[in-house]
Image (cartoon, grey):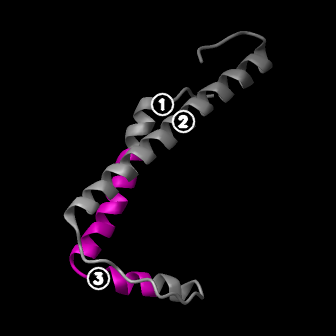
């Protein structure tokens, strides 16, 4: 099995989550987020009185930072678990320790 670099995987997770949320920040900055939320709720068969707050650059920066950190932590953890599981599988298959 393949050994993955957990730190690189964490960076990928951070970038993916941040870029995804940049799209949301742009929707909110242009005033289109309410339309998107209404559409998302409608296609899921939900009705909600969710109302978007006015755009706040500080909160947008906090959203991007928080999601980047969360993406990094989750994907680094996934990489570590992957490496531990592949090392365990390799040891149980061959009886020889490999790098973990």
Read off the residue under disc 3. Answer: 32
Is residue 78 toward the left or the right of residue 72 in the image? right
Kindly report which numbered mark, 3 or 1, lies closer to the viewer in this rendering. 3
Q: x, y (%) of residue 37?
A: 42, 81
Is residue 42 toward the left or the right of residue 93 in the image? left
Q: Is residue 72 magenta?
A: no
Q: Is residue 23 magenta?
A: yes
Whether 88 is drawn above or below 62: the answer is: above
The residue drawn where x is 54% and y is 86% is 43
Between 21 and 3, which is closer to the camera in this rendering? Answer: 21
Read off the residue under disc 2. Answer: 77
> How many C-alpha atoms fall within 10 Å of the one at disc 2: few (<14), some, or many (≥20)?
some
Q: x, y (%) of residue 93?
A: 78, 20
Q: How much space separates mark 3 and mark 2, taking CA atoms? A: 35 Å
Is residue 47 toward the left or the right of residue 13 in the image? right
The stretch of residues the image draws in magenta is 13-38
């Amino acid at each position: 099995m393949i050994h993955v670099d957990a730190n690189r995987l964490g960076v990928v997770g951070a970038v993916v989550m941040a870029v995804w949320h940049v799209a949301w920040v742009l929707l909110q900055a242009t005033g289109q987020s309410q339309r998107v939320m209404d559409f998302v709720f409608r296609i899921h068969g939900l009705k909600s009185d969710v109302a978007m707050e006015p755009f706040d650059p500080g909160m947008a920066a906090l959203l991007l930072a928080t999601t980047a950190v969360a993406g990094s932590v989750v994907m680094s953890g996934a990489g570590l678990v992957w490496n531990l599981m592949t090392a365990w599988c390799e040891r149980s298959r061959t009886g020889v320790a490999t790098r973990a």
